[in-house]
Image (cartoon, rainbow, N blue to C red):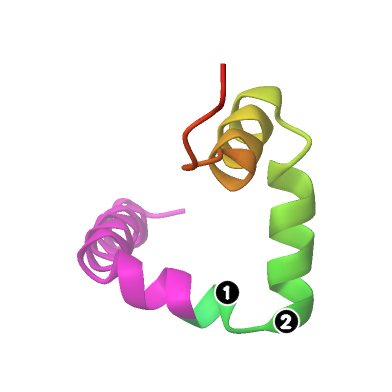
C-alpha cells in the first residue's frame, strides 16, 4: 500500500466518522425504521442488565399514589 493510498484511507475514515456523528439521529432513524433490524437491536439491548433494568423500570413505574 502506498503512502498516498493510506492517506486517502485515513482521510476517508475520518470523514465517515464525522458525517456519521453529524447525522447520527438520521442514521439511527434509518436503521430503526427497518422492523426486523429494530427487533434484533432491541433484543440484543434487552440482554444487557443495565439497559434492561432501566427500560423495565420506566415501563413498569406507576405514577399513581400508593395507599399505605
Q: Please determine whether, in this image, residue 52 is positioned above or below residue 3.
A: above
Identify the magenta region. 1-29
Picture quadrant where residue 21 is located: bottom left
The picture places residue 57, in percent across and down from the top left corner, at 59, 33
Q: Residue at x 78, y 35 (%)?
A: 47
Judge whether residue 7 is colored magenta: yes
Identity of the residue furthest to the top in this view: 68
- Residue neighbourhood size for the residue with mark 1, other residues' Cα within 10 Å, grouped as few (<14), some (14–19), many (≥20): some
Q: Secondary structure at mark 2?
A: helix
Q: Determine the image quadrant of residue 15.
A: bottom left
Task: Please say if the residues under marks 2 and 1 sit with CB atoms less than 8 Å apart.
Answer: no
Q: Is residue 25 magenta?
A: yes
Determine whether, in the image, residue 5 is placed left or right of residue 54.
left
User: How many labels sit on residues?
Assistant: 2
Q: Relative to 2, say whether 60 is above or below.
A: above
The residue lying at 72 percent from left, 81 percent from top is 35
Position of the C terminus by quadrant = top right
Return the residue at label 1: 32
Report the front residue among 68 and 59: 68
Q: Residue 8 occupies which quadrant of the picture?
A: bottom left
Per the image, the residue denoted by label 2 is: 35
Amino acid at each position: 500500500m502506498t503512502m498516498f493510498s493510506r492517506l486517502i484511507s485515513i482521510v476517508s475514515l475520518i470523514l465517515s466518522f464525522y458525517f456519521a456523528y453529524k447525522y447520527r439521529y438520521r442514521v439511527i432513524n434509518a436503521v430503526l425504521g427497518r422492523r426486523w433490524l429494530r427487533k434484533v437491536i432491541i433484543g440484543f439491548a434487552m440482554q444487557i442488565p443495565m439497559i434492561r433494568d432501566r427500560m423495565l423500570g420506566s415501563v413498569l413505574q406507576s405514577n399513581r399514589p400508593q395507599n399505605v
